C-alpha cells in the first residue's frame, strides 16, 4: 500500500514528462488540411426533393502527413438524414463533424459552414 508513496516526487516528474512528451509527439506527427467543396448528400423521405444552399462545404481534417496526402474530395461526403421530416418547406440543418463520412485514420475537425439551408419540395 505504501509503494506509491516512495519516491513520490520522482513519480510525479516522470508522469509530467510523459504527458508533455505525448502532447509534443501528437502535435508534431499530426497535420491539418482543408478539403474544399465536399458534397452534401441528403437522404429524405420518398416524395420530397431537397435543394441545398450551399450544396458543398469545406471540411477540415487532421491526421498523419501520409494519410492526409492520400485523401481527396472523392473520399469524403457529408450525410444528412431527413427521414423524420414529412413536410415540404425550408429547413436549416447543422452539420456536425460526425456527419462527415471519411476514410479511417483521419479525424474530421470542422465543417465550414456549419449549417446549410434545405428547401424541401414535393417530387414531380
Image: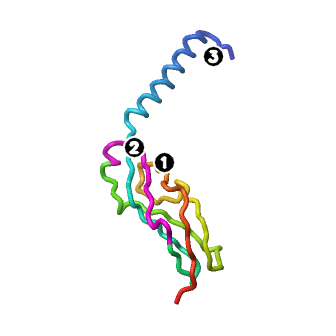
Residue labelled with disc 2: 32
Residue 81 image-quadrant placement? bottom right
| Quadrant in which the N terminus appears | top right
Going 43% across and 28% down the picture, which residue do you hit? 24
Q: Is residue 87 above or below residue 34?
A: below
Residue 63: say if magenta. yes
Residue 118 image-quadrant placement? bottom right
Residue labelled with disc 3: 4
Sequence-wise first label, 2 or 3: 3
Judging depth in this view, the residue of 124 and 79 nearest the camera is 124
Query: Which residues make up the magenta segment?
Result: 52-68
Residue 7 image-quadrant placement? top right
Going 38% across and 32% down the picture, which residue do you hit? 28
Q: Is residue 99 above or below residue 60?
A: below
- Describe the element under mark 2 as helix, strand or loop: strand
Q: Disc 2 and disc 3: Cα gap in Å?
A: 40 Å
Q: Disc 1 and disc 2: Cα gap in Å?
A: 9 Å
Determine whether label 1 and label 2 are within 8 Å by CB.
yes
Give the image location of residue 49, x and y in percent. 53, 80
Amino acid at each position: 500500500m505504501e509503494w506509491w508513496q516512495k519516491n513520490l516526487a520522482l513519480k510525479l516528474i516522470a508522469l509530467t514528462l510523459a504527458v508533455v512528451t505525448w502532447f509534443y509527439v501528437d502535435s508534431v506527427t499530426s497535420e491539418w488540411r482543408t478539403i474544399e467543396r465536399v458534397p452534401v448528400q441528403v437522404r429524405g423521405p420518398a416524395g420530397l426533393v431537397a435543394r441545398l444552399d450551399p450544396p458543398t462545404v469545406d471540411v477540415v481534417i487532421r491526421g498523419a502527413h501520409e494519410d492526409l496526402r492520400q485523401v481527396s474530395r472523392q473520399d469524403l461526403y457529408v450525410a444528412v438524414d431527413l427521414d423524420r421530416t414529412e413536410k415540404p418547406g425550408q429547413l436549416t440543418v447543422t452539420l456536425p463533424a460526425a456527419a462527415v463520412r471519411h476514410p479511417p485514420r483521419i479525424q474530421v475537425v470542422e465543417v465550414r459552414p456549419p449549417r446549410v439551408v434545405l428547401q424541401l419540395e414535393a417530387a414531380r
